[in-house]
Image: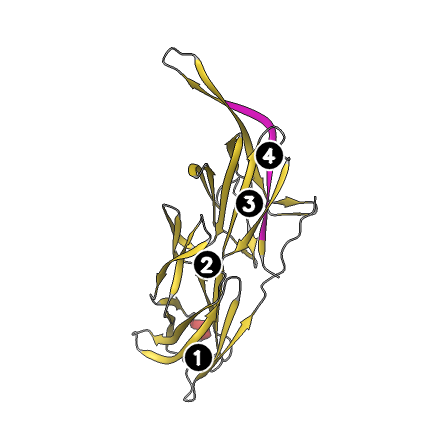
Amino acid sequence: MKKVIMILAVVAAVCGCERVVTDEGTAAEVVQVKRVRFDVSSEGWRVTRALTADGQDMTDLWIFDYVDGGLVRTLHKTATDVDFNEPTMPLAYGEHTVYFVASRGKSPTVTGTQIVWESPSDTFWKALTLNVGSGTASTVAVTMDRVVTKLRIAVADEVPATIATLEMLPGQWWYGLDYLTGEAVANSDAVRQVAVPASMAGTTGQLAVGFYCLSDDAEWMADVTIRAKDGDGAIIGSVSLADVPFVRNRVTDASGNLFASQSGFSISLNEEWLDSYTLEW
């Protein structure tokens, strides 16, 4: 079952109005507005100031409000905000398309309709059509779907004492998301690198790292090279894998020897992440 983040959009009972005033000082137009609060909650279960998946908190939440195809309001919350998991947004009466993105990727940049991360991580997305009016239901459930894939690398043989970094060189890798379409963008073949803790030296079967990538629904393949380097940047272990399969919301496991003379990795697929949270009202 897919891992999802559940957000409840609670429409507040209080309605406000926005007035457009003419040069003569008279109100020319009154726009009816409701303040909508997006809240993560359920009887017996509640996330406080956090959106969590796989035991990891999201760090950023974006809400983009569109009316008649045009962006009218953007809301960006971070984990340090007291209302991170329950932000409010004033919405004028009428039909809105609201786009949600929650992520814990590093150094995000929003340009146009694209969010690009310096280092992608777990990310969720949803588009919701909401008709705001006096008869709007008090509670609307929004299910955000995972829009990343993950390559998990597990080294089976003994780790040399000289190891400093582990690198992953992909043939292609997506670093961004178009929040209007939910499609992966910003393709790159840049090297991904992680520092290996000194405590891993001399261990066997304990070194494992994961790399996230934005992904579409259709399965795709990429050649991947995995290599280890010492403190001087010299390669001390390497393996190349051809046609590694990836797809949204699925983990690809790559495991095997990296330093032994008979190096080799096997590829397997973990079709499921954690069960979804189920909310009833």
Depth check, mark 3 against mark 4: the one in front is 4
**Which residues make up the magenta segment?**
5-17
Within 10 Å of disc 1 (Cα), the crowding (few <14, some 14-19, many 20+) is many
Task: Determine whether label 2 and label 1 are within 8 Å by CB.
Answer: no
Distance (Cα) linking label 2 and label 1: 26 Å
Q: Secondary structure at mark 3?
A: loop
Within 10 Å of disc 2 (Cα), the crowding (few <14, some 14-19, many 20+) is many
Q: Secondary structure at mark 4?
A: strand
From this viewpoint, which residue is outermost toward the front?
68
* Residue 154 point in image, percent of width and height: 49, 75
Q: Nearer the viewer, residue 96 or 278?
A: 96
Q: Secondary structure at mark 1?
A: loop
From this viewpoint, which residue is outermost toward the bottom?
261
Q: Amino acid at mark 1?
A: Val
> Mark 3 = which residue?
49
Distance (Cα) linking label 2 and label 3: 19 Å
Q: Amino acid at mark 2?
A: Ser
* Residue 271 point in image, percent of width and height: 57, 68
Q: Which mark is residue 121?
A: 2
Q: Which mark is residue 11?
A: 4
Query: Considering the image in quadrants, where does the C terminus appear?
Result: top right
Depth check, mark 4 against mark 2: the one in front is 4
Distance (Cα) linking label 1 and label 3: 39 Å
